């Protein structure tokens, strides 16, 4: 039986969640891809999980895949299989990622942090983006305006990853020696502080996201935050925010 959990979060947004572990299974963080159907019928995807048969079937029913995005420097492992399935899609990366993928037979149309600030790739009327230049993994935060949804990769964790392990025989419970890793935990606050290579840039970036009118956070690792999403962001980034 497949361990992929496919969920229609809103009429426009579908997520694809699955188990993913680090540290020899001691850190079950889960993984998640997010697909959004734009108003013109095109599909925009943050691709962080494999393109399984059921994933592809669901995405194809949504519409034509026009954009495939890498959320940060670490979220690139499945880009080639997505590109092979949708060779005409526009691939958007982040600073430093093209070097990691230089052995592949395709190139990014553009990259956050490389292209001039304010560069538009075609979806910005519906999905606003903000590049975290000061974050070690060069993450991007996206805001889907009509559904008031914030989409991120490693800028926020919300563990345990209950949904992502709901079809797995493995447990979503962290090993006993791992601290709690939710937005309001001290571990999370210290994590984003440590990962902030440029503290002043991080302060500005965290504040910019907070100004967006989001009511939900879809992250790659952990359960989607459906209630008090802004409070979760403020808590996670309290070391940066006034």
Image: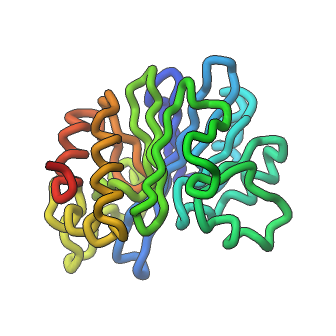
Q: Is residue 179 left or right of residue 206?
A: left
Q: What percent of the width, then of the height, locates residue 164? A: 42, 52
The quarter holding residue 210 reads top left
Q: Decide: is 8 above or below 111.
A: above
Q: Is residue 192 left or right of residue 118?
A: left
* Residue 52 in view (yes/no): no
Closest to the observer, 170 or 94: 94
* Residue 26 in view (yes/no): yes
Q: How is the image coloured?
A: rainbow
Q: What percent of the width, then of the height, locates residue 208? A: 34, 41
Q: Is residue 14 left or right of residue 96?
A: left
Q: Decide: is 194 above or below 17.
A: below
Q: Residue at x 38, y 26 (%)?
A: 148
Closest to the observer, 123 or 115: 115
Number of residue marks: 0
Q: Decide: is 23 above or below 89.
A: below
Q: What percent of the width, then of the height, locates residue 96? A: 61, 68
Q: Residue at x 18, y 40 (%)?
A: 231
Q: Residue at x 62, y 41 (%)?
A: 119
């Amino acid at each position: 039986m497949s361990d992929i959990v496919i969920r229609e979060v809103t009429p426009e947004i579908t997520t694809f969640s699955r188990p993913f572990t680090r540290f020899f299974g001691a850190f079950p963080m889960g993984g998640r891809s997010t697909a959004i159907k734009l108003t013109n019928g095109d599909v925009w995807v943050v691709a962080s999980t494999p393109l399984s048969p059921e994933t592809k079937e669901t995405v194809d029913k949504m519409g034509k895949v026009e954009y495939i995005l890498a959320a940060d420097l670490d979220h690139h492992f499945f880009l080639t299989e997505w590109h092979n399935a949708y060779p005409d899609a526009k691939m958007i990366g982040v600073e430093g990622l093209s070097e990691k993928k230089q052995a592949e037979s395709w190139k990014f149309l553009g990259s956050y942090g490389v292209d001039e600030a304010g560069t538009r790739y075609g979806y910005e009327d519906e999905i606003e983006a903000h590049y975290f230049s000061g974050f070690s993994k060069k993450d991007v935060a996206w805001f889907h305006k009509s559904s008031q949804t914030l989409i991120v990769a490693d800028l926020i964790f919300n563990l345990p990853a209950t949904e992502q392990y709901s079809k797995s025989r493995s447990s979503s419970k962290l090993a006993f020696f791992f601290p709690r890793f939710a937005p309001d935990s001290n571990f999370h606050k210290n994590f984003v502080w440590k990962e902030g290579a440029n503290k002043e840039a991080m302060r500005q970036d965290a504040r910019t996201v907070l100004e967006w009118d989001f009511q939900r956070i879809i992250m790659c690792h952990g359960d989607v935050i459906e209630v008090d999403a802004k409070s979760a962001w403020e808590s996670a980034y309290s070391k940066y925010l006034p």
